[in-house]
Amino acid sequence: MVMYRQYDGYPDGHGQELAEFLKDISIGNGISGNKEIGSFANGMGCLAAQIVVNFKKEVGGFYLYPSGTRNCGEEFTYIVTAKDGKPWIKVCEGTVAFFGNPGSVRAKDMPCVWEGFASDFESAMVTTKNH
């Protein structure tokens, strides 16, 4: 899915909020025992639904687009995948100039600001700000 946040998409805003939500979630295939939202996701589709539930609280602000959609006005792109059963975030910097035009840079070619486990995001951002 593509979820666009209209305001405050910067790493110290939305990035921090996303990492905070994801940091304690494990990702697996199949549900056993008593699992709760925010602690376990039954695959990436389940995780995507939990992300929407976590962020969408009012009209406006957050919008969903079909997978692969670009040129929504994004300045940062947060690519969330699973690695070793935990959320892995890749933060790419780019404006609308990177998307939507023939020959433009694709997300995989965007400058990567940070990449790692969600649980490591806050300490990495503090380190980045101090340098």
Image (spheres, rainbow, N blue to C red):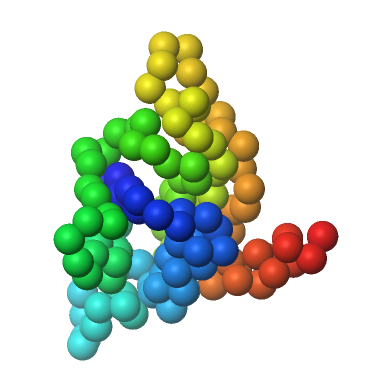
> Where, by quadrant of the figure, is residue 47 drawn?
bottom left
Whether residue 46 is visible to the viewer of this picture, yes or no, is no
Total residue callouts: 0
Q: Quadrant of the C terminus?
A: bottom right
The residue under the point 43% across, 26% down is 99
The residue under the point 30% across, 34% down is 69
Above or below for 53 versus 9: below
Indicate the position of residue 14 as horizontal and vertical percent values: 45, 61
Indicate the position of residue 2 as horizontal and vertical percent values: 30, 45
Front-lying residue, 103 or 119: 103
**Is 42 situated left or right of 123 in this image?**
left
The residue under the point 45% across, 69% down is 17
The residue under the point 23% across, 41% down is 65
**Is 128 situated left or right of 111 in this image?**
right
Whether residue 14 is visible to the viewer of this picture, yes or no, is yes
In the displayed orientation, state which residue is furthest to the right: 131
In the displayed orientation, state which residue is furthest to the bottom: 34
Indicate the position of residue 120 as horizontal and vertical percent values: 60, 69
Front-lying residue, 73 or 24: 73
